[in-house]
Amino acid sequence: MVIVGTAGNDSLAGDAADDVISGLIGNDTLLGGGGGDNIFGGEGNDSLAGQSGNDLIFDTSGSDTLSGGDGDDTIFGAAFGVIDGGIGNDSITASGQGNTIAGGAGDDVITVGIANVVTTGSGIDTIILP
């Protein structure tokens, strides 16, 4: 299913299938549900959660909260956000500074810039610095 938000503050949720969810402008809450979802924030301070499935979560604008949930997720964030990989072998990239990043359970690869706080979980994690 393809779900597209508005220029306002949206609360959007996918279902058990593979979804594409785009929040656009506003302070949005986007939930993937089951399946392998592609979730895109936009301008604003957003909350994006993949939940179960192998998800792509992408938001590089605003102070965002990004959560992978269960599954092997790929997460891209910018600056001054909170990123939680959850359970699974995740790939997390934080391009800016001031993020709080938790790898969670699983073998994660975390790529960060300067001035970020990274907490690893169970598993063998790799942290890549500039």
Image (spheres, grey):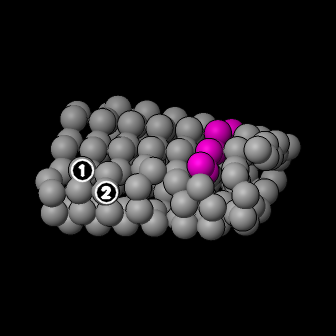
> Residue 80: x, y in percent?
55, 67
| Residues at circles 2 and 1 in contact by the CB criterion of under 8 Å | yes
Residue beneath disc 1: 24
Q: Earlier in the sequence, mark 2 or mark 1?
A: 1
- Residue 109 magenta-drawn? no
Camera-nearest residue between 109 and 59: 59
Q: Quadrant of the N terminus?
A: top left
Dot label at residue 58 = none
**Which numbered dot is residue 43?**
2
Q: Which residue is drawn at 23% across and 56% down?
A: 25
| Circle 2: residue type | Glu
Where residue 116 appears, as percent x and y from the top left, is 70, 63
Residue lying farthest to the right in this orientation = 124
Please name the amino acid that badge 1 sits on. Leu
Tell whether 84 sits left or right of 106.
Answer: left
Residue 69 shows up from this direction: no
